[in-house]
Amino acid sequence: MKLLKPSINKIPAYVDALKRGWSPDNLRSEASQEQLSKISQDAALFVSGLDDPTAKAGPIKLPDGSEVPRLPSVRRWLWDNEFCGHIGLRWKPGTEDLPPTCSGHIGYSVVPWRQGEGLATAALVAILPEAKAIGLKHVDITTSPENPASIRVIEKSGGSLLTSYTAEKSLGGHATLLFRISLAE
């Protein structure tokens, strides 16, 4: 498995995954259709907005429909002979703190037909050096207590459970587990 920076030459594989029912956003099911629409309008512009370390791509739409300013972020595509999913890293410059409308530094999603192969764990481990390189001392990752596969991914990657809480209403207001992975040597 490799992490690839999104590119226009790999966009057909991404589109295929969206059309097959994969969603890049586990909180907003309509994200797939929104992305297919954006890709059909201007695929190059869409791809350029996925890797956005300067937060220039505009606001983020939350599950409740509200919008918040975008944080600097990078997105990587999981590639193992085909598109397998994505992993994203977001941060607030100069601090490990995140706004309450951001559920964690890292989010990931594997296409359903490739789940259970260890791809999410490999991707999470592989993106940690990027988090360290931008100056983060730790990353926070959230998941649902009803998602044992994601819990295993985080724990196998060095994550420790910090707390459980109810997410902000704008993020769906659901039960959430907060894990932390230290990036200290």
Image (spheres, rainbow, N blue to C red):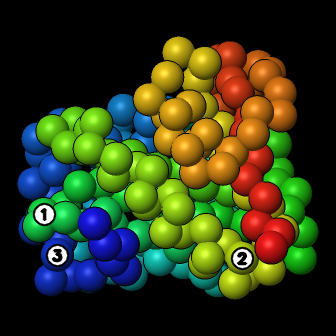
Residue located beneath label 2 in the image: 132
Tell me the distance, in whole angstroms, between the alpha carbons under discs 1 and 3.
Answer: 9 Å
| Element marked by disc 2 | helix
* Residue drawn at point x = 11 percent, y = 67 percent: 81
Which residue is denoted by mark 1 in the rendering?
Answer: 82
Q: Which residue is mark 3?
A: 10
Compared to 119, does 177 lie above or below? above
Judged by depth in the image, the label closer to the viewer, 1 or 3, is 1
The amino acid type found where label 1 is placed reads Glu
Say which label, 1 or 2, has the lower sequence index: 1
x, y percent for residue 16: 10, 54
The one of 133 and 159 positioned closer to us in this rendering: 159
The answer, for residue 75, to whether it is visible in the render is yes
Q: If the image is split into quadrants, where does the C terminus sit?
A: bottom right
Question: Mark 2 or mark 3, which is nearer the start of the sequence?
Answer: 3
Q: Would residue 164 be found to the left or right of residue 171 on screen?
A: right
The secondary structure type at the circle numbered 1 is: loop
Measured from the top left, where is residue 182 in percent x and y? 79, 59
